[in-house]
Amino acid sequence: MKKWQTALVALIIIVIAIAIFYQYTKMGAETDLVTDDGFKIAYDFHQVSDKGVILIHMMDQNKESMKDLATFLNKNGYSTIAIDLRGHGASSENWKDFSEEDFQNMKYDLKVAKNFLVQKGINKISIVGASIGANLALNYSASSDIKRIALLSPGENYHGITTLDTMQNYKGSVLLVSTKDDSESYSTTEQLNKNAVNSKFISYDTGGHGTYLLLSHPELQQTILEFLNNN
């Protein structure tokens, strides 16, 4: 092969590689969900059935903190979508700059995740949330058709997202989980249990807060699964 032919072949290969890379990058950008108020929300999605669970992490964490629970639920017949709340992980902005209104608007992050599942043909949807994710799960579900939620270490008021008033308006089933060494959340969870229409309260002496409960109490995955299965 002549030198100019070799150079031409090399050029063609480079052009094809650039085109593939550009298309891959473009596809990656399009995988973000976009909320009603314009925030890009990163997510991990695994579809295995028409039953789905939205997984919502705690403050200053991301969707990776829900990875083990997602894998467990996938193996047991549930599709999952774990999102990075706005200001966290690979989603838009930085939560450290947020106002209370910005935090309250995280409800749109749950809405876009739920709509995504519906578009995929997943209509039996539950939510598992931790800490501020628990508060968001309750608030969003109280104004939607979500019938089953699991709340890990909910609080009375996380950045303006309140629960004691909201629980009275939620008619679905609630799994409440908290530890006695997390005193503020535990006190709130006790009250939420009293206010709930249909709830189950799992109490531990120790184990920490939010998604750390999934690490300190591995059996909690099975508890959550049994709760979700109890339709």
Image: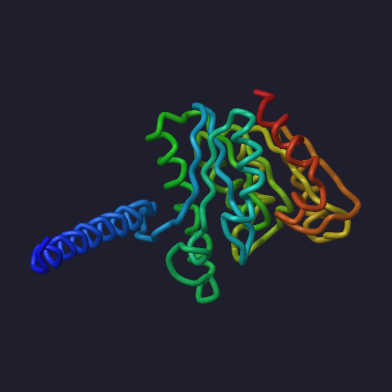
Picture layout, residue 75 above or below residue 93: above
Image point 59% across, 28% down: which residue?
A: 77
- From where the camera sits, is residue 26 visible? yes
- Farthest residue to the right: give it: 205
Picture layout, residue 136 above or below residue 61: above
- Farthest residue to the front: give it: 1
User: Within the image, what quadrant is residue 2 found in?
Assistant: bottom left
Identify which residue, 203 or 30, lies in the foreground.
30
Image point 54% across, 29% down: which residue?
A: 51
Image point 52% across, 64% down: which residue?
A: 89
Q: Is residue 117 left or right of residue 172?
A: left
Picture layout, residue 144 above or below residue 165: above
Identify which residue, 21 or 230, lies in the foreground.
21
Q: Which color scheme does this rendered protein use? A: rainbow
Picture layout, residue 113 above or below residue 24: above
Q: Position of residue 74 (x, y in %)?
A: 59, 35
Image point 39% across, 52% down: which residue?
A: 33
Q: How many marks?
A: 0
Identify which residue, 174 or 11, lies in the foreground.
11
User: Within the image, what quadrant is residue 202 found in?
Assistant: top right
Q: Is residue 215 left or right of residue 76?
A: right
Quadrant of the drawing holding the C terminus: top right
- From where the camera sits, is residue 35 visible? no
Quadrant of the drawing holding the N terminus: bottom left
Q: Position of residue 36 (x, y in %)?
A: 36, 53
Q: Is residue 31 left or right of residue 9?
A: right
Q: Position of residue 25 (x, y in %)?
A: 31, 59
- Farthest residue to the top: give it: 231
User: Within the image, what quadrant is residue 146 found in?
Assistant: top right
